Image (tube, grey):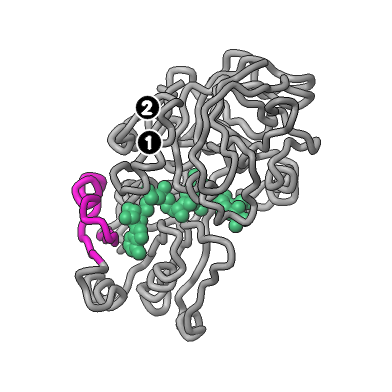
Amino acid sequence: MKTRAAVAFGAGKPLEVMEVDLEGPRAGEVLVELKATGVCHTDAFTLSGDDPEGAFPTILGHEGAGVVVEVGAGVKSVAVGDTVIPLYTPECRECEYCLHPKTNLCQAIRTTQGKGVMPDGSSRFSLDGKPLMHYMGCSTFSNYTVLPEIAVAKIRNDAPVDKVCYIGCGVTTGVGAVVFDAKVEPGSRVVVFGLGGIGLNVIQAARMVGARQIVGVDINPAKVELAKKFGMTDFINPKEVHDVVEAIVDITRGGADYTFECIGNVNTMRQALEACHKGWGESIVIGVAGAGQEISTRPFQLVTGRVWRGSAFGGARGRTDVPTIVDWYMEGKLNIDDLITHTMPLDKINDAFDLMHEGKSIRSVILY
Ligand code: NAD
Ligand code: AHE
Ligand code: ZN
């Protein structure tokens, strides 16, 4: 079949919207008609050329929602007509990782996914007879996409797809990092570096679980108003203080119980670790840093009880936890609507990247 898609032909080049060819689902795969997709910072990261796994030409996008329109042989867990969210972290429920209680990082198809192909090693997308790469196993910047059955979460049919698409990455990443990975306790002092599409979800989850103090750190003061609405109690602009770590230790009376790095900058990752309370503070790295970047700190920071860890897709097991997060939104426990600051058709997708780079959007959503 033909589908309209935004194709990334090379690093740093604008996406080109065009018709491409899409082969139907093979055994264990499903064809999904995307209704909406968010544009995440990670799409921009890969498009920039900084992603060691970035391969071109490709169809980016990993934050979608849509409807199953065809299933391949043997597919049992979803059917035509089901509303689904594609999962860049699948959940096979059989691999060593899925069976381990401490991780959500299903590895069943990770190798082929990282190479931009389906689990059988081939691509379903092509242009003029030449393959186009899949991206993060999702490629939601295409009106139709093919996904492994284990990489779709079936969600309630009454959920608004133009909003819950954001649960496909940003909401789950931020909320899950607090709830599933860090397991922030009521009364905690929490610090969030980066008040963007991820950081604001960390903030609303910290409020949801009863944090006593939520400090936001960002160089863009335009983010303050929305962050306060989502639960931020204090704000620090690194450009306005002599030493951001000192300022955090001071405002949190000795250091944070939890810090979350939601930027992707190795310098702020170090600050986030060192702003943790001696003896017990935990710093969670969410931001994705570019190829060749490394983090460092004095080992004494760890010897004296601070913990450095990371979080991918919020520690969520997609097929199990994503439907629950959709329920939290539908029950009014999570605010997604106010974070979707812009919507646009696929033709205007490059505007979404411009708005992100200019710091003018939280989330842009493409409506098919
Ligand atoms: P975003 O662009 O919406 O937000 C980033 C924020 O950081 C902005 O508000 C910006 O002003 C602020 N910022 C930039 N440099 C700063 C600095 N030096 N000090 C303080 N603030 C600074 O991005 P996003 O969509 O929220 O994504 C954030 C990061 O999380 C990205 O690196 C993205 O790739 C990553 N991410 C990781 C996962 C995961 O599973 N681990 C999932 C999604 C996104
Ligand atoms: N491909 C990169 C790493 C990119 C990365 O860290 N991705 C996050 C999700 S970001 C979503 O917006 C993730 O889940 N990582 C776990 C995984 O298995 O990819 C690189 O450095 O090679
Ligand atoms: Zn993302």
Disc sitting over residue 344 in the figure: 2
Amino acid identity at mark 2: Met
Is residue 75 shown left or right of residue 48? right
The Cα–Cα distance between marks 2 and 1, rounded to whole angstroms, is: 9 Å
Residue 347 covered by magenta stretch = no
Q: Nearer the viewer, mark 2 or mark 1?
A: 1
Using the image, determine if residue 209 lies above or below residue 189: above
Query: For the magenta stretch, what is the residue range?
Result: 213-237
Q: Are marks 2 and 1 in contact (CB under 8 Å)?
A: yes
Is residue 82 shown left or right of residue 28? left
From this viewpoint, is residue 193 visible?
no
Amino acid identity at mark 1: Asp
Dot 2 or dot 1: first in sequence order is 2
Disc sitting over residue 162 in the figure: none
Disc sitting over residue 351 in the figure: 1
Using the image, determine if residue 164 lies above or below residue 356: above
**Could you say where residue 57 lies in the image, as x and y percent from the top left?**
64, 39
Label 2 residue SS: strand
Using the image, determine if residue 294 lies above or below residue 192: below
